[in-house]
Amino acid sequence: MTNEEILNAEKERVKQLVAKDQLNADKIDSIYQQAMTVASATTKVFFDKYQQDGQLSLSDVSQSPTQWDIEQYQKAINQMMATASVTSDLRKQLNVLYQQALLTRRSLLGSLLGSAVVIATANVKELGHKVIKSDYQEGYNHFGGGS
């Protein structure tokens, strides 16, 4: 290959790497968006149930969660966990958040949002591990290590 052909091939490889990075960034955005969509929808369910004249009262959100509240919380967590790999760290974080959720309705809603972020972050971390492994293998093969 001539120097110009090598240069053009490397430019094309850089374009492919940039496109792959953008695809990964889009996947990360999607992971967080999905988690926030579930948290938002569940928060709306709570708001619709407890609001009076379009507002939540401090006394309502300061009460202990009902069985219905806890079921809605668990339903949302289960929905977000459907695509997550459960690790011991994730399990510990979710257990702490669940204990906080049992205090008041306000803490339950805060815990729901915290859980959404924790689950999404675990999914992003898993994606990151896959990307690193794939990038390493591609780089190894590209530079002749896999031949």
Image (cartoon, rainbow, N blue to C red):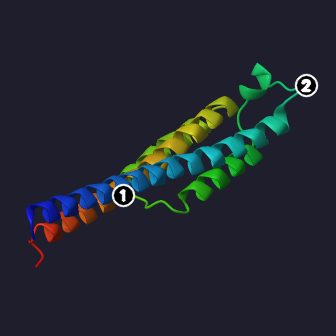
* Residue 65, image quadrant: top right
Near-viewer residue (126 or 146) = 146
Identity of the residue furthest to the right in this view: 53
At 53% across and 38% down in the image, what residue appears?
114
Disc 2 to disc 1, C-alpha distance: 49 Å
Residue under label 2: 53
Vertical order, 90 against 99 (above or below):
below
Residue under label 1: 20
Type of the residue with mark 2 = Asp
Vertical order, 132 against 36 (above or below):
below
Kindly indicate whether the residue at mark 1 contacts the one at mark 2 (C-beta within 8 angstroms).
Answer: no
> Does any portion of residue 91 appear in the rendered image?
no
Near-viewer residue (122 or 66) = 122
Q: Is residue 60 left or right of residue 15?
A: right
Near-viewer residue (103 or 97) = 97
At 69% across and 33% down in the image, what residue appears?
105
Secondary structure beneath dot 1 equals: helix
Type of the residue with mark 1 = Lys
Q: Position of residue 119 (x, y in %)?
A: 49, 49
At 83% across and 34% down in the image, what residue appears?
50
At 55% across and 36% down in the image, what residue appears?
100
Q: Position of residue 73 (x, y in %)?
A: 66, 47
Q: Nearer the viewer, mark 2 or mark 1?
A: 1
Q: Position of residue 96 (x, y in %)?
A: 48, 41
